Amino acid sequence: MNTTTRARARRAAGAAGAAAALSLGLACSAAGSAPGTAGTASTAPASPPAQSVATPTPTPLPGVGTPPPTGLTPTQIANAYNLGPLRQRGIDGAGQTIVIVDSFGSPSIAKDLTDFDAAFGLPAPPSLKVIQPAGPVPAYTDTTTRSGWASETDMDVEWAHVIAPAAAIVLAETPTAETEGIAGFPQIDTALDFVLSHHLGQVISQSFGATEETFSSAAQLQSLRGPYELAQRDHVTVLAASGDNGASGETLDEKSVYPTPVVEWPASDPLVTAVGGTELKLSPAGQRVAPDIAWNEGGGGPSHVFPRPAYQNGVASVTGRHRGIPDISMDASCSSPVPVFGSYLGGGGWQTSCGTSLATPLMAGIVALADQVAGHPLGLINPVLYKMLASHSPGLTDVVSGDNSLRADDGSPTISGFSARRGFDLVSGVGTVNGAQFVPELARGG
């Protein structure tokens, strides 16, 4: 599904979302609250001030208002990932297209992106094209499901655009909800087949997933992989969120989570790059005031369907015989959320959002920048990520503290997960990115 029940509540709660989440059963991790490797720290670089992205003052607009002060701004995110040197070189996603796939989409996405850009002084993308290749989306009604997907869509589009402001965007909307098990995936496959057969973009962002165990069989899940095989053939990068239930995942009825570690598909697919979550602690200018930590609710662990792919042989001591996720991580924590603007019927205005549903479009923007540098689409980037890890690439920032064990309100673990550590781990993957170095390294193949 696009988000967990808890993540939906966080987004619906608007600017108070992060605080509201704490009352829903399992708290987001706070700074220092998640155990990790004692006495260690990540090597997160601070962007050189001379190369930082300029800091405009958010602009109040009639009917739009001022973005909530609790969310990280586009400038803070751009500086946190050291994009200033890239922007100075004209690396902004020009000539690239990011494809975002969402159930239902948002009926107000064009206006919402325009208002979001105006508030933060961002340029409009070269184009925003909305397609419905799996059939017409029913008229919007103000239900939890529809407002949740509208909010998800606004976040996906707005924050992919933040990272790669000169990239075009294609939003592929489907007419049915993706929940758990196979529900919604046949329509998603139809949309992906259309996108790929018509060569509509170089990178695909998917902020959804279903627990592997909710499919009726491994064969049922495997029957849905056709678009990812086509993407691999055509050198299109496919990303997917690792999930927002920590080391667990929701059951088929969406009323509970599994009592043992599980992971979500399509993030677990070896042909997909799984994007996990971190927590950022930034100054108003976007400089780090503390190392990134792994987000406590970020999905991660070994797949129960897919064996370890060859590109993970170097981390077999961590993954065992299984495909392990995530591959890489970006901001997702509800303690470092971002503002999202939406004006869809029955809701609207500013809210703060979080989750690996945010991390994924952020990473899609990074890939678009690398595609621009390379001058061609990179396709499956996972082999390069693990090559960069093995060579201790300066483009990767290690995340060495935090875990994704699920906890009760009193902080006691209810489902033991995985801890961040030096190198690859099953909560942050290979770490996170220092964009100024990561983008050119990814573009040249590590």
Image: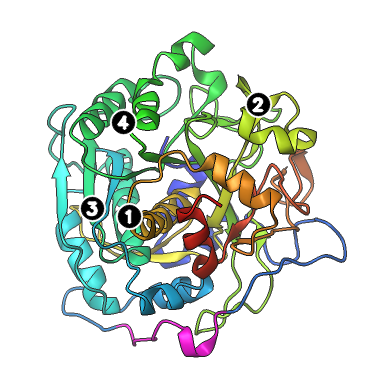
Residue 68 in sight here: no
Q: What residue type is labelled 1?
A: Gly
Q: Give the residues in magenta.
A: 47-58
Work out whether residue 303 or residue 96 is closer to the camera in this orientation and state it. Answer: 96
Image coords of residue 70 (percent x, y) = 47, 74
N-term-proximal mark, 4 vs 1: 4
Q: Quadrant of residue 94?
A: bottom left
Which residue has dot 1 on it?
A: 375
Q: Which amino acid does label 2 sit on?
A: Arg
Which residue has dot 2 on it?
A: 308
Q: Is the magenta stretch mostly helix, strand or loop?
A: loop
Which residue has dot 4 on it?
A: 177
Which residue has dot 3 on it?
A: 169
Name the residue located 67 percent from the left edge and 51 percent from the top edge: 389
Query: Marks 4 and 2: in contact by CB < 8 Å?
Result: no
Q: What residue type is labelled 4?
A: Ala
